[in-house]
Amino acid sequence: MTLEEKKLQVVEDFSLYDEWLDKYEYLIEQGKNLAPFPEESKTEDKLIKGCQSRVWLDYELKDGKMYFKADSDAIITKGIISLLIDVYSGRTPQEIAEDDFGFLDQIGLKENLSPTRAGGLASMVETIKRVAAEVKDKKEASDDSQVLSADDVKELAPLYENVVLALKQVYDPEIPVNIYDLGLIYEININKDHKAYIRMTFTAPNCPMADMVISDAKTCVEDVPGITGCDIELVFEPAWNTSMMTDEARVALNMDFDVDDNSQE
């Protein structure tokens, strides 16, 4: 379903209710459908500023599309953020950043909220658009900087090797093998400005330590002399399997070398 089709569906869903009390009930039910938001992820940096109630927002970038997760400690606010991420999850950063969120006016949401909740809604919209614009700008900057000459490639070879060494210092606490040898690093690019762009995965989509491991990887790479920054994109396609592990990892885990296992762990 396209973004425009999804917004039209929301407008039609709200039109089924004549009274705003019923529409509030609809929003509350929406909030109950939110995927669980881990308590350990409810950190200050994920709070949306400007909301009277606490609202946490996070996202992952997968195959060029943004997938949001959120939570709130107020039932109406939770319903509102649930509605927004239901519409905008699975869209490209450009689609989100350039959208006018006009469907909210069509359903009359802003006019029928209290001033504090209306202000919170505006903060949610602003945050989602801002985050999408930042991801869009980073991607464009990365794409523009990836055309390297032969001399560039030669110059960056030592940097690349040091980034690999840095990633080999990062471990998932549940697995005694570093993330590089485990095969979680799908791609490493370094642009002309010496900024690193990394695509990585985990052995399972719901890894409870994902945020911590990504943070550790980003810190280790940014500590490499000569590296000016690091962006990490989390992906799950292709799905990880044990054939992606290095021989060193297989030795550490006492695995056979002739196993051709294409199943996800």
Image (cartoon, rainbow, N blue to C red):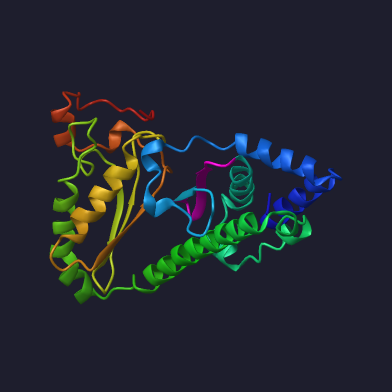
The quarter of the picture where residue 246 lies is: top left
Left or right side of 68 for 199: left
Q: Is residue 145 above or below residue 116?
A: below
| 20 and 188: which is toward the camera | 20
Q: Residue at x 34, y 73 (%)?
A: 145
Image position of 233 (left or right of 96): left
Image position, residue 197 (x, y; %):
31, 60
Classify the position of the C terminus by image quarter: top left
Q: Quadrant of residue 241?
A: top left
Q: Position of residue 9 (x, y in %)?
A: 76, 49
Viewer-nearest residue: 74 or 244: 74
Position of residue 206 relative to residue 190, above or below, is above
Q: Which residue is drawn at the image coordinates 38% and 51% (left, top)?
A: 44
Query: Which is more toward the observer, 68 or 105?
Result: 105
The answer to which image quadrant residue 22 occupies is top right
Q: Is residue 71 magenta?
A: yes
Spot occupied by residue 220 in the image (x, y as percentages of width and height)? 18, 54
Q: Residue at x 67, y 35 (%)?
A: 29
Number of callouts: 0
Secondary structure that dominates the magenta span: strand
Magenta-colored stretch includes residue 122: no
What is the residue that sits farthest to the right in this orientation? 18
Q: Where's residue 66, x and y in %?
A: 50, 53
**Viewer-proximal residue among 149 and 193:** 193
Q: Which range of residues does the magenta coloring cover?
A: 61-74
Identity of the residue drawn at 49% across and 66% down: 133
- Residue 150 vs 101, above or below: the answer is below
Left or right? Give the position of 158 relative to 13: left
